[in-house]
């Protein structure tokens, strides 16, 4: 069961041809469902609104209504732990909206082991405005993620035109040195992930210019997105990191305990 343009459907969605489907003029948000609750809904809504403004989408569903729609989707699908995706597509002077959910989660045993990551073959251009919103123009991210997985890696990390690290295909990246956490600056050409925003605002994570040759100078590194929250990196290209799993798990628990809707 999914929600599409004001109704709930059990079977096929009555898709209409619009700029979202034809030209990628759309934005989306993926939220974590934890014990039947949506995490950080206000942050996701704020980013959704900003993305709609960039793409000139006249999205007018207020936060309270969208929250109720989203909660109804996870209720009807009996999602206790999993995720919810909100997709807003431009349709001339209005919009289409699709809200879906699933019960897939990141397993703790994967986090205990850590990810093996590589640099992406393609690059981000720091002046591309689409880097800064969660748009439906996501093909290069998926291509790089699939390439990484095809060589038995877990994630691909983009550089920009200046050899500066930006972000992963589905994550933000962080580096730790002497117990200080650093993450690439927004102006390098990356999305301000919700967990990234929280880490900067609540946990004093510092923004920095981090170049490809710098990765060997850090003690270890980790990734984040709304669903994984925190994921250690065990290998970055040929560099092995001895990450502090206890510290990262405590950090994740502190994030979970923040009381945002």
Image: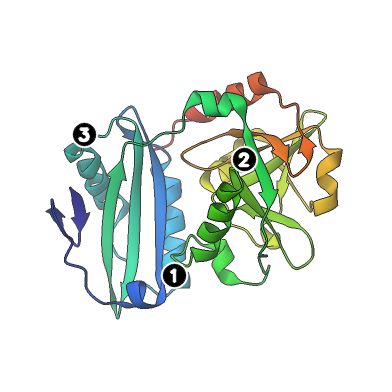
- Distance CA(mark 2)–CA(mark 1): 28 Å
- Distance CA(mark 1)–CA(mark 3): 33 Å
Asked whether residue 8 is in view, the answer is yes
What is the x, y in percent for residue 23?
40, 77
Give whichever of 104, 151 is nearer the camera. Answer: 151
Instruction: Check disc 1 and report its element: helix, strand or loop.
Output: helix
Q: Dot 3 surroundings within 10 Å: few (below 14), some, or many (20 or more)?
A: few
> Farthest residue in the bottom direction?
92
Decide which of tag 1 and tag 3 comes sooner along the chain. 1
Asked whether residue 211 is in view, the answer is no
Residue drawn at 69 percent across, 62 percent down: 187
- Distance CA(mark 2)–CA(mark 3): 29 Å
Q: Which residue is mark 2?
A: 223
CB atoms at circles 2 and 3 under 8 Å apart?
no
What is the x, y in percent for residue 259?
44, 31
Residue drawn at 59 percent across, 34 percent down: 231
Residue drawn at 65 percent across, 39 percent down: 116
Q: Which residue is mark 1?
A: 53
Q: Which residue is mark 3?
A: 78
Task: Choose mark 1 or mark 3, whichever is in front.
Answer: 3
Q: Quadrant of residue 195?
A: top right
Q: How is the image coloured?
A: rainbow
């Amino acid at each position: 069961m999914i929600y599409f343009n004001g109704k709930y459907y059990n079977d096929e969605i009555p898709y209409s041809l619009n700029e979202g489907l034809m030209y990628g003029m759309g934005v989306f948000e993926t939220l974590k469902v934890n014990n039947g609750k949506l995490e950080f809904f206000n942050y996701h809504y704020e980013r959704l609104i900003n993305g709609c403004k960039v793409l000139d989408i006249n999205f007018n569903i207020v936060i309270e209504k969208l929250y109720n729609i989203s909660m109804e989707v996870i209720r009807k699908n009996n999602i206790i732990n999993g995720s919810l995706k909100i997709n807003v597509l431009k349709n001339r002077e209005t919009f289409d909206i699709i809200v879906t959910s699933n019960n897939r989660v990141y397993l703790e045993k994967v986090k205990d082991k850590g990810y093996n990551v590589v640099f992406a073959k393609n690059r981000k251009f720091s002046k591309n405005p689409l880097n800064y919103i969660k748009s439906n123009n996501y093909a290069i991210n998926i291509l790089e993620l699939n390439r990484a997985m095809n060589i038995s890696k877990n994630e691909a990390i983009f550089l920009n035109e200046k050899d500066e690290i930006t972000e992963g295909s589905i994550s933000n990246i962080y580096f730790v040195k002497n117990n200080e956490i650093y993450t690439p600056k927004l102006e390098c050409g990356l999305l301000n992930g919700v967990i990234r925003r929280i880490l900067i605002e609540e946990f004093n994570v510092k923004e920095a210019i981090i170049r490809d040759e710098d990765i060997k100078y850090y003690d270890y590194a980790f990734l984040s997105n709304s669903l994984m929250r925190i994921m250690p990196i065990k290998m970055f290209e040929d560099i092995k990191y001895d990450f502090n799993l206890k510290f990262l798990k405590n950090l994740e628990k502190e994030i979970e305990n923040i009381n945002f809707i």
